[in-house]
Image (tube, rainbow, N blue to C red):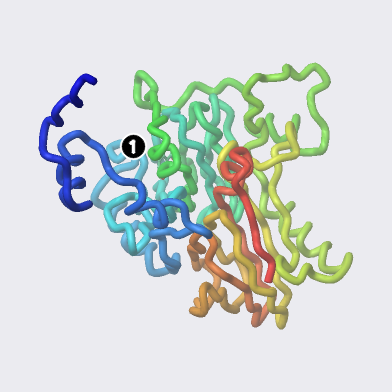
Amino acid sequence: MTPALSPAQPAAKTLSDLYAQLRPHNLAPLWEVLSSLVTPTPTTRAVPARWSFSKVRPYLMEAGELISAAEAERRVLILENPAMTGESRTTQTLYAGLQLILPGEIAPAHRHTQNALRFIMEGEGAFTALDGERAYMHRHDLVLTPAWVWHDHGNETDAPMIWLDGLDIPLIQSLDASFAEHSADRGAWPTTRPAGDAETRWGRNLAPARRIEQSNPHNPLFIYPFSDWRETLESLRMSGPAHPHDAYLMEFVNPRTGGAVLATMAAFARLVPGGFETRPMRSSESSIHVVVEGDGALEIDGTSYALTPGDIVVVPAWAQRRFVASSDLVVFSYSDRAAQQRLELWRELLL
Ligand code: GTQ
């Protein structure tokens, strides 16, 4: 019999000896970490958090005095999760920021693999242009910039315009899939189509008969006016009782697919009638909620966050939450549900 080859080092006598031997070889024992990797339910580093628009606004205006939109490229204050400071993230997967564009300014054209949505907080009539088509934005409109579409922002009005940016930056970062390009002249994209063209073609339950089926069916509709979605919520309350867990909840949809507005993010409009309390629930998506009208509270894992217009509240993945409306609460929200559903990961638990 051939003798066994002698090991490079003496056999480890204890597990900790073994671990010391493994480390230089970039090896690690799964059994030490398995239960924290493969958890029965989601564990997240994100914590619930709330910002009030009126408290953030003065800082944003100060930034407006100190740096131009052109210099900054995007003049934004990031709403960082308090448990993940310095990481430019609001939840594990989602980013939120407040962007200011002053009269006469342009935020130059660029495109990137990150998906973005804007929810207008203040101002009337500045524009976002997608591939050179402008959409003029009004308070509480939802505006989209799907991945890899050229976009710039401009303000030709005489008042500041502020919106909430919702992006999937941390998700794209975790996938190491960030690509970006900037317009050669660092200016606005040349106008290619009349303002409002996308709404005309896609925003009225019609679609161009000779539409080209794209391999990437990104959403061709990029503005969802407040006046439309607010009216829908109002009509719903007449049509029947509120859902016990959702109250009146509608999803903004991509007219091409009927699915979520963006490849990774879904967006919602909710009405919780005054006096109504939703039943508690959990969802694997993380979500960011913006109070448009009304007062009440969002209870997250037993802590009550008072809600008033302009509040922005983070609900981490799998947190137990419920809405309590003192007066009619109108809430916009977005989440990573679209990404989770595409990956067949999304779940909820209705309690
Ligand atoms: O407006 O394109 O808040 O690219 C962060 C990254 C906004 C934008 C942000 C961006 C944008």
Q: Is residue 98 visible?
A: no
Q: Furthest residue to the right?
A: 239
Label 1 near ligand 1 (CB < 8 Å): yes
Image-quadrant location for residue 238: bottom right
Residue at the spot 80% in from the left edge and 28% down from the top edge? 207
- Ligand 1 image position (quadrant): top left
Q: Furthest residue to the front?
A: 1
User: In the image, 240: left or right of 103?
Assistant: right
Identify residue for label 1.
73
Residue at the spot 41% in from the left edge and 51% down from the top edge? 37
The answer to whether 133 is drawn above or below residue 49 in the figure is: above
On the rendered image, what quadrant is the C terminus found in?
bottom right
Instruction: Please provide percent x and percent y for residue 70.
Output: 32, 36
Q: Secondary structure at mark 1?
A: loop
The answer to whether 254 is drawn above or below residue 212 in the figure is: below
Q: Is residue 325 visible?
A: yes
**Pointer 1 local density, CA inside 10 Å: few below 14, some 14–19, many at least 20:** some
Residue at the spot 10% in from the left edge and 35% down from the top edge? 9
Identified by mark 1, the residue type is Glu
